Image (cartoon, rainbow, N blue to C red):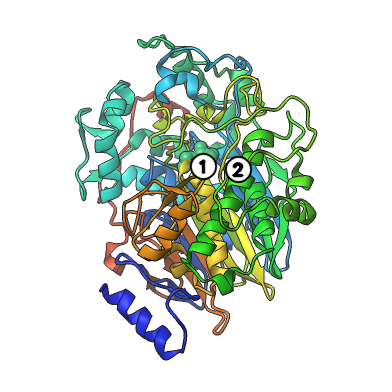
Amino acid sequence: MHRAFAVATLTLLLAGATVGDASAVEGSQFREAVRSNGGIIASESPAASAAGLEVLDAGGNAMDAAVASTFALGVARPQSCGLGGGGFLVYRGANGEVAALDFRETAPAAVTPETFAGQGLYKTFTGHTTVGVPGTVAGMQEALDSYGTIGLTDAIAPAEKLAREGFEVPKSLSEEMGNHVSRLRLFPETAEQFLVGGEEPYPEGSILVQPRLAETLALISKQGPNAFYEGYIAESIVEEMENESSFEGDEGLMTADDLASYRAVWREPLIGDYRGREVITMPPPTSGGIAVVEMLNILEGFDLASEGQSSADTLHLLAEAQRLAFADRNEYVADPDFVDVPTEQLTDKDYAESRGAEIDPEQAAAHKAGDLNEAGQSPGEDENTEGSTTHLSVIDADGNAVALTCTIEQTFGSAVVAEDTGILLNNELTDFTGPGTANEPEPGKRPRSSISPTIVVESGEPALVVGAAGGAQIIMGSLLAIVNTVDFGLDPAQAIDAERLDAQSETKMNLEQGRVSPQALADLTARGHTIERREGEYAKLPRVQAAGTDPDTGERLAATDPRSGEPASVGQGGASQGERDSLPKTGGPPLLCLVGTPLSRWLAVCR
Ligand code: GLU
């Protein structure tokens, strides 16, 4: 018997409980949460966490740290996030103020419902046609303007240093370079930036220096978002789009007007409640918040705590709630600026009760969307089920909290680096679904997302600050963390360690089976679930990062998912999930200055 399993079993028996009740059967890769009496950061990049920590230690707040970490992620976790991408964030101030920022990428004006209906390089989720207008720079400026205390220059400084001096390539990045080597080799500028000699992945522990990206960051730091949306960088991106591509079906669509008209948008956060806790999450154009709230509302009608964690009854209810919510999500959720999304109905408690009544306790079912009388919709399931992306959760010493998920869509996005900028561009437009669906491509529209940054508040404190990567699996990443926290009393580390379930459609069920009993598995099969994933304890996705508050001590907790490459969560006062000395070492002294490059001509000072 696994040691952690044995200990948990013994503890439960001593406590008079039976296995299968509210328990935390920790897996073999369980990562203990860091604890701090100051601020904490959960992320899956040691370099990004260190960047945020530096800002917290210098007196910055949670938003300052989240923005600094986001810029650093773009350098040190370039496969997931960056200046060429976008994302969503949910904020809750210690004073109770809440906000939600949409810095999602946007379709260029030239996009039509048919743009992705034919054949072309875009069918491989690669190349210029897939690129949406990036939102990260506008979003980070908005976030700082509204809730930060530092300026863009200070927030960018750690990222710029990482790009200029380099950082040790972690195993996760080296492996992804290897997995995507053939895509990275398609475009010379990309190959030069991310492959040794333009050919081979950087080995783990080698130093990756990105001088062009450093120059770009310096320019934004000095001139602000205008440099990105209207200045030199915009010109370079447009030039990249206009370059004739050697691949069929790889037309660049983005124009100077598309970039100049980009705006990050503050949206009304979606507020739910689950068993007396407040749930603050992201409204459309992501489907994540609606689906999370709808599922929680459905599940509230059932006593999961009595059924027991990992029991067949609980897993059955989770799967059925997901299939119901996903049928609604696929049919109704898209960019609210283009489609009348029935958000209120989908997140209504009475609606959830009626949906919950459709669940047969003994039989798995494929569910249809509720009849909400919305015109002209048809189901749009995601074609792209895997994804990259990365999430970070921050709580500062005062209790301000940020859940932020940033993305360039798939691993290494479109695989196109815009000429002379070091900016790896997203392939977010592949998140649109087919013509005739609510989420069809249209000019200026934001593709539906699954990103689900969520803050759960209990007794006035951020009990859980959570979000995930992993395509449409993101949604269950956040949902399960919430259920495990609220129904089963787990701390953030245990809540994200526990087995994952994902049941998007038909009667299929992806399940990490390692910590589910053979009896429960047999029971689920007998109820008609087709259990598809047989990886054992941990699959690859979704990767969930979580922070929270210990209700007994008031300490802040942060944990990196065991499914993420490197333990990377940190807290003020020296708390770290990894060894302190495994936090990023930069690549050492040579200060690079690209004298003579077009970018450095735009910079008054070359540092
Ligand atoms: N593009 C995806 C979304 O917004 C996230 C990327 C991923 O799949 O991890 O839903």
* Relative image position of residue 226 (x, y in whole percent): 60, 32
Residue at 49%, 72% in the rendered image: 557
* Relative image position of residue 371 (x, y in whole percent): 76, 37
Quarter containing the N terminus: bottom left
Q: Which amino acid, mark 2?
A: Phe
Residue 123 position (above or below residue 24): above
SS at badge 2: helix
Toward the viewer: 530 or 166? 530
Identify the mark at residue 404; answer none if there is no mark: none
Residue 430 position (above or below residue 115): below
* Relative image position of residue 73 (x, y in whole percent): 43, 48
* Relative image position of residue 357 (x, y in whole percent): 71, 54
Residue at 73%, 56% in the rendered image: 271
Mark 2 vs 1, N-terminal side: 2
Instruction: Point out the frontmost of discs 2 and 1.
Output: 2
Toward the viewer: 349 or 107? 349
Residue picked out by circle 2: 326
Residue picked out by circle 1: 472
Q: Which amino acid, mark 1?
A: Ala
How many angstroms separate mark 2 from mark 1 (CA)?
10 Å
Q: Could one spot residue 373 in this view of the protein?
A: yes
- Tell me whether circle 2 and circle 1 mark residues in contact (CB < 8 Å): yes
Q: Tally the marks.
A: 2
Q: Is residue 460 left or right of residue 77?
A: right
Residue at 32%, 61% in the rendered image: 583
Q: CB of residue at label 1: within 8 Å of ligand 1?
A: yes
Q: Is residue 119 left or right of residue 334?
A: left
Q: Is residue 157 left or right of residue 488?
A: left
Q: Could one spot residue 516 in this view of the protein?
A: no
Residue 9 position (above or below residue 560): below
